[in-house]
Image (cartoon, coloured by chain):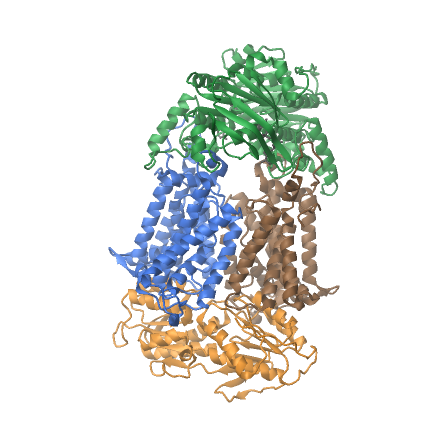
Chain colours: A green, B brown, C blue, D orange
Amino acid sequence: MPESATPAVEARSVTKRFGPTTALDDAGIVISEGETHALVGRNGAGKSTLVSILTGLQRPDQGEVLFAGRPAPSVADRDGWRRQVACVYQKSTIIPALTVAENLFLNRQSGHGPINWRSLRARARDVLDQYGVDVDAGRLAGDLDVEQRQLLEIARALSFGARFIILDEPTARLDGPAIERLFERMRALRSQGVTMMFISHHLEEVYQVCQSVTVFRDARHILTSAVEDLPHEELVSAMTGEAAAGYQARSRTTATDAAVVLSAENLSLAGRYQDVDLAVRAGEIVGLAGSGSSGKIGLAETLVGLHAADSGTVRVNGDRPRPGDVSSALRAGLGFVPQDRHKEGFVPLLSVAENATLPIAHKLGRFGAVSPVLRRARAERMIEDLAIKTTGPSQPVGDLSGGNAQKVVMARALADDPTALVVINPTSGVDVRAKQALLGAVEDAAERGAGAVLVSDELDDLRICDRVVVMFHGRIVKEVPRGWADAELVAVMEGVDAR
Amino acid sequence: MTETTVASPGTPGGSPGPRDTTRGEGSGLRLARFRDLALVPAILLLMVVGALLEPAFLSGDNLTNVLQQQTELSLLVLAEAMILIAGKFDLSLESTVGLAPALGVGLVIPIASNGIGTDLPVALGIPICLLIGVMIGAFNGLLILRFKLSAFIVTLGMLIVLRGLQIGFTGGQNLFALPESFLYLGNARWLGLPASIWICAVAYAAGIVVLGYFRHGRSIYAIGGNVDAARAAGVRTDRVVWAVFMIGGFLAALAGLLMTGRLGSVAAAQGDGMIFTVFAAAVIGGVSLDGGKGTLFGALCGVLVLGLINNILTLAGVSAQWIQAIYGGIILIALMLARVTSGKAQD
Amino acid sequence: MTETTVASPGTPGGSPGPRDTTRGEGSGLRLARFRDLALVPAILLLMVVGALLEPAFLSGDNLTNVLQQQTELSLLVLAEAMILIAGKFDLSLESTVGLAPALGVGLVIPIASNGIGTDLPVALGIPICLLIGVMIGAFNGLLILRFKLSAFIVTLGMLIVLRGLQIGFTGGQNLFALPESFLYLGNARWLGLPASIWICAVAYAAGIVVLGYFRHGRSIYAIGGNVDAARAAGVRTDRVVWAVFMIGGFLAALAGLLMTGRLGSVAAAQGDGMIFTVFAAAVIGGVSLDGGKGTLFGALCGVLVLGLINNILTLAGVSAQWIQAIYGGIILIALMLARVTSGKAQD
Amino acid sequence: GSSTSTTPSASAGGSSAPAAGGGKVGIDFPRADSDFWNSYNKYVPQFAGELGIDLMPPTNSQNDVARLVSNTQALVSQGAKAIVMAPQDTGAIATTLDQFASKNIPVVTVDTRPDKGKTFMVVRADNRAYGEKACKFLGDKLKGKGKVVEFQGSLSSVNGRDRSEAFAECMKANYPGITVFAEPTEWEGTKASAALQTRLTQHPDINGIYMQAGGVFLAPTIQLLKSKNLLVPPTDPKHIFIVSNDGIPQEFQAIRDGQIDATVSQPADLYAKWALSYAKAALEGKTFAPGKTDHDSTIVDVGGGRLEDQLAAPLVTKENVDDPNLWGNQVK
Ligand SMILES: Nc1ncnc2c1ncn2[C@@H]1O[C@H](COP(=O)(O)OP(=O)(O)OP(=O)(O)O)[C@@H](O)[C@H]1O
Ligand SMILES: Nc1ncnc2c1ncn2[C@@H]1O[C@H](COP(=O)(O)OP(=O)(O)OP(=O)(O)O)[C@@H](O)[C@H]1O
Ligand SMILES: [Mg+2]
Ligand SMILES: [Mg+2]
């Protein structure tokens, strides 16, 4: 670590508690001027808590924050903080009822005079173009999908002109090309001397854009090192506290005569996808890939009943669930992980146990009653299976860290031993270890005889699939069997190799 | 008081198991979950104050009076609390309190006693009354769920329409030629206590059990907390919300029935202005207007707090001139007390 | 009507430029942004109905009456709409309408005319009145922001307390002996129109411009939409919300002043029951109870709709027996019309 | 606030015929936010003192019948032996009256006659007479021709309904040439003002107004007429004849100033005086029979043996407005 000058940012022995949870325990971080510094750790290690302290949203119970050697502004002085640091938070800070342009320039729409909306929109368009975000600046932010919202947040933080920028899992909801564009921006900013803190569970990204890395584990600082001095396995073992083991996709063979558990026939939804046919057999995992507006999310959401298709049929275990009705699809034996966990994933005020058992409540007691004991037992098993970091089954999901909330959503999908599974970006925001657990859970389900559709922007996730169906502009263009190389699949997704 | 660890009915599965990272202030989180108990200290304090002010306060008679006087309000609060937890609103409950019994009575009594003139069999009176409550709830639900109108304005409109219909049908007259059956529930005593108290107790017990331990009850919380997530988890949200509105209408009609019996007539303004108190009791009891939060037990506590304050002010003989200011002041203080003892921000 | 593309003042940044991703449902999305114009068809319809029913309806005099009768309400709605957009509640506005002028008058008139006996200089009356409004807003803000109490219950408690204080201070008497200054604003005519209309127009124009085109105004939307996000963006949320409450109190006191002048006395029940109508107008006008949504222009339309309905019913001489049912029915219909023409679910 | 310290009276409850003069009297005020009722509220302790009545601290039901019921029940459980109340909602207290009857607690109601239930005495002025007096006055002044605006009370209030019905019947029977615009106001000044303003625009030739409650409607009406320059002396053809109702001091002043022409004085003082007297008489075991009384009024049997003392309610005009016997001239 270059010790030459005062660090740009320093947090010293910070402690932060939430009720019984100690989110940060005497932890600290030192980030030197001009570097891109990675912060990694398992879900619930306290990364986002540090972010909220470094951006002045929360006051630490103990410890202090220094910017260029000077104490940070007081918590009330929001302008002071804003001058020091810009941030992409893990939780969305987009205001749905306002337009994209206004979100982009929130609280800085104008200098002193009245706001000139026309020029604001023009400025917004410039920024959006610069970051390659293809949305109309006049649209309501609430109409954007998660990915577009994430891009908007990133564009906002980067365009702010701050000398220190924090990015808390910016890539978790982006696809490959968007991540690449982000990294280009980050490199450009670094060449202008901007300091950055970067949080991600994709360790290869750390190696791509960061110079140094700090690891947190169980609310404590474990180590800080230059990236090149820390090989991948050592980084993982620092995070997990045990030796790393790479994830090996299991080999499976699907009987070609196994029953079709989930199928789409001639499915079309205007503006999203057209004429899609898909059949998933028992014991099979089918990947669904595609970049930018390929329609894969729309298709997956139709399969589970979040949308009603304009034409065509969906079958689950031979049944035809009522189009646009999730519960009848679930009743037919489907399990489902939605794209946006905050929207369709969980009820923040309800406990882990209740969220995870929502679809199986009818099995947890007689005559419509739900036995708290049974529910607790089920939930404890899920917590253990998926290694959810929580104070217990009764903790509200809203209080969990992002990755752990994602695991609860996964637990909910698997709760009913579904015979058909549709999972959309299931590992978004989930740490390396947990990712293995989640993907393992999908494979387990397949081994039990379920058929799964796995929609993901991450090539790593798709490796467990028996075949990957690639969509391009709303149509299925190719089916790639197991054993593909990254470049090959990307080429198909980009539409280069669609024979 | 604040160290209680009794699992409250509304938050089952609540015992927080031991955890590794637990260091220090464990009780904070545990307590936060018992915000529905927040009013218990206030209630006890009021009991003590009442007893000190006036020996008659603690007499069985007086306490029974307090309870009986709150029965209709508490049924409305039960209805409203459920609807609020489901993330909706119903302002029209107060009109149902008047209209349902007015029609129930008006359709069966002769025109000479201000009846409507249909002279239906008297035995149909009570079923009609309750059915009208359910139908009003169903109609509200229809407008809100099918036509996607705002619950607040639909039920505000209905509040005015229903009251207007009652005045229209009865010409603003009170109906006092009540069939015996209408008087029974409001006046009977079962096992030494007014029947209406038993009815309320049963309704609350059922509500607490269903919202605490039954699938459909829990799904109300899920819907109020995040309707998209509830739908994605297979809850038939529209159906549940609709049912909640109908149950709400039913309870309001039942409250109207009890009030009719207790007061011996259907006043043209029966229930007028109650909805404010209903919201006050529910919200004081910890039910959030945002949905998904609060318990029926808490709401019941809210009702009791308001009832006790009223009773104590009456017993204390506060001057007519200042009674309202004092009443409001005590409510504010009770709230702050609840805030301090529960230690959690309200919303 | 439904194809309008006039940019409404409250939703700037909305220019519905051509969109790349527009496939099919473009106009639906575009229209949705003009939910604050949703009531315009209803208003036009009411105008036509009024003109058909009664030629006097369209006379300048009558329309001036309609406006003047709604001035106090519209100031309250302006206040409430801002508070709602900021994601809060204020029920106590209606009591401020009574208490602020009552104290303003009571402190300056002699005890013989039911004054409080302080006999302050008469010139201080109006400043005191307005100051009291601001102070009530500030006190509400203090309890809500510093003590983190629920806005709904704080202001509900305050509603009762303030009304109680007014009755306490005045002994429940109406104050008839008003200083001239209190009568002026409610009665003066400027450029041929009642002064109160001008005041309202200026207040709304200022509000619409500030909430539409100034940073602090926009931050109210941000706060109501997502307070954490607003704080993260550097908005001093507490300060803004506090200011909104104080402005709200000020506007309520001003409304009280106008009403006092127009009616020639401070009634003990002045403002009583208005808050319901205030919410109705705001919500009908598209302001959401969830915060962050709606415009002042929409709220003003809500006020106008209610005022027109009232005026038409009076002109038509509807029988007292059915007037309320008809009034409520028309409101419901206007809402459905707004829902249909705006094509968007309400909330 | 009154702080009548109550001595624990010896009488144990339950005896069917209370001993002469024994027992506390509980009283509930209907509201404290109107001039009329405030005057009544002030007369009560005064007359209680004069009559030597052991008065409990009065309660206030704030115009809410549910509160009235709970207040009076509380008074009884605190030991009241007789109750004076003024139920503004006359239907909703039948059961309560029956309860009190079963406990042998006599009830005197003021201002309103319960639709049903046992009362010892009803003390009220005849509200139908109010309406008729107003109608006759206006009819004569307008010589049977013209347009009259009537501010009705709330339809759901008996007093309001009685006044409205009597006014309408009298107008129809005696002055068919007069058009009556009945404006529903729910007893709200703002509603009355708006209705009058609208009506004057529609019919600028309105020449009479009947307000059913001066306390509420007086100021808004005068203010509106003033701003329209319609407050002119009776000699002017543009004069609008105004009859009010209540008899508060401000109405008298308005009569003296020529702003309104008449009001029906509703006797707040007599309400308080005779309600308490009858309560006292009830405790002393006295009974009454229909017929003339010693105080210029008549006790009538309104059916089922229920007695009502119908107090005189004089019409006050410029001629008798300075009569010192009017309660409105005795305030303060
Ligand atoms: N508002 C809160 N209330 C209660 N507990 C909280 C709150 N915020 C965070 N926590 C707890 O603090 C711990 C650290 O959370 P944090 O969000 O900082 O984790 P993280 O490292 O960002 O995890 P992830 O990688 O999943 O985002 C977690 O156990 C979480 O449950
Ligand atoms: N709720 C929506 N309403 C209207 N259009 C939408 C909505 N959500 C997404 N779209 C648009 O529909 C098209 C297809 O969306 P879809 O989400 O199915 O693609 P995708 O596979 O997620 O694309 P990507 O690879 O970028 O994630 C995109 O142009 C997207 O912007
Ligand atoms: Mg995090
Ligand atoms: Mg996508």
The x and y percentages for residue C26 are 42, 32
Q: With respect to residue C223, does A300 lie above or below?
A: above
Residue D36 falls in image quadrant: bottom left
Q: Is residue A401 left or right of residue A392?
A: left
Residue B274 in view, yes or no: no
Residue at 59% across, 63% down: B310
Q: Is residue A112 left or right of residue B30?
A: left
Residue at 52% across, 55% down: C157
Looking at this view, is C220 or A487 the one in front? Answer: C220
The x and y percentages for residue B273 are 53, 60
Q: Is residue A167 left or right of residue D193?
A: right
Residue A465 in view, yes or no: yes
Residue at 39% across, 58% down: C256
The quarter of the rendered structure image containing the C terminus of chain D is bottom left
How many numbered callouts? 0
Residue A50 falls in image quadrant: top right
Looking at this view, is B139 or A189 the one in front? Answer: A189
The x and y percentages for residue B101 are 60, 62
Judged from the image, the quadrant occupied by ligand 1 is top right
The x and y percentages for residue B250 are 62, 54
Q: With respect to residue A379, does C211 lie above or below?
A: below
Q: With respect to residue A352, does D262 lie above or below?
A: below
Q: With respect to residue C149, does D145 lie above or below?
A: below
